[in-house]
Amino acid sequence: MRDRQVRPLSALSPDEVGRLLARAMESASVLAPVRRGRSSFAFAWIQDPAEAVFSYPRTILPPKQALLPPREDLFTFERAPEPVIRPPAAPGPITLFGVHPCDLAAIGQLDWAMQSRHDITDPNYAARRAETTIIGLECLPDEYCFCPSVGTANTREGADLFLTPIGDGFVAEALTEKGNALLGSVEEARPPTPEELAVWKGWADNKESRASRRLEARPEELPDLLEAEYESEVWEATAARCYGCGTCTSVCPTCFCFDVEDMVEVGLASGARRRQYDSCQFPDFALVAGGHNFRGERPDRVRHRWFRKFVYLNREHGRAFCVGCGRCTKACTADIGLVEVLNAVIAEARREEAE
Ligand code: SF4
Ligand code: SF4
């Protein structure tokens, strides 16, 4: 769905997008997709606009790292000469460049989880988010993507400016005043031609038809379908292949579970409270005081991953907590496909319903 547009569409050449990026770098740290090796891409803090790529299938890790870093100190402390607790330094302005629609949707879900859920706001996340400008970038699904199945293929919410490739250049949509100001800094921006506008308008249909991986149910049907299959053998069969490595959750743009640990110097004079990503696929994730483990067996942990995304948070938030980016499937060391597992469970539920 398109957000309110505050400025007419503009056409930009790749050089003009480079100048826009250079302008953004004058006042903010810029996280942008860069090439890694022959065929991989990663979000990295760039020093030069030429490092950024303007077309890529997906990055290994999502841009989530700018808002919720894999590891951070929540505060540090010293006991002497006077006890003191130091909060983290205030973040400076951040620009996320080249964010695909699925990752925009994921940032929207993180905003809910880290700033609104249970009426609690995570101050570190909120401080970074308030300083963030987002430049979105249109893309085409590859064989791992299933964004149309979870309704994220055409997300614009969260972007201040959005770029759609059109032949040699881009159509730029300013979606907020921040995006408008950024676009206004490129003096050469001109209105798109009717031909360019036709390409821009056709992009959404193109995406729908390109996504070959599909869920066999609508996201809102999934809580009931999965709950009917709580005891399904699919979970055992998937767990028999799974190594429990946690790669799937590490690369996921919507996973937000973390562990908190106090790191105290040996003399107890100073230390830090540190948090880092955790994974529900690790054996000790649900281990509690007294030694009880709520998900001590691997099939329980495997099932939990699908239930968390498609049942629990789907009910609580009103949408599946998966944006169809395909990262978990592409990265899985055991070649376990998220959609294939889901479709096997859906088929089983439908078969039993029909009996
Ligand atoms: S569960 Fe997999 S496909 Fe869904 S958002 Fe996470 S990494 Fe992407
Ligand atoms: S990446 Fe694959 S093997 Fe590793 S925990 Fe996830 S599903 Fe299991």
Image: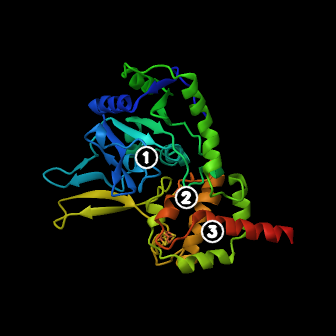
Query: Who comes first in sequence, dot 2 or dot 3?
Result: 2
Res 126 → quadrant: top left
Residue 43's place in the image compared with 193, above or below, is below
Q: Which residue is mark 1?
A: 122
Nearest to the observer: residue 192 or residue 1: 192
**Closer to us: mark 2 or mark 1?**
2
Q: Which numbered marker is on residue 341?
A: 3
**Closer to us: mark 2 or mark 3?**
2
Ligand 1 contact, mark 2 (Cβ < 8 Å): yes
Q: Which residue is mark 2?
A: 144
Percent from the top left, x then y, of residue 205? 64, 41
Label 2: few (<14), some (14–19) or many (≥20) C-alpha neighbours in 10 Å: many
Residue 78's place in the image compared with 239, above or below, is above
Q: Can residue 297 be seen in this snapshot?
A: no
> What is the three-letter code of the residue carrying label 2?
Tyr
Label 3 residue SS: helix
Is residue 227 shown left or right of residue 113?
right
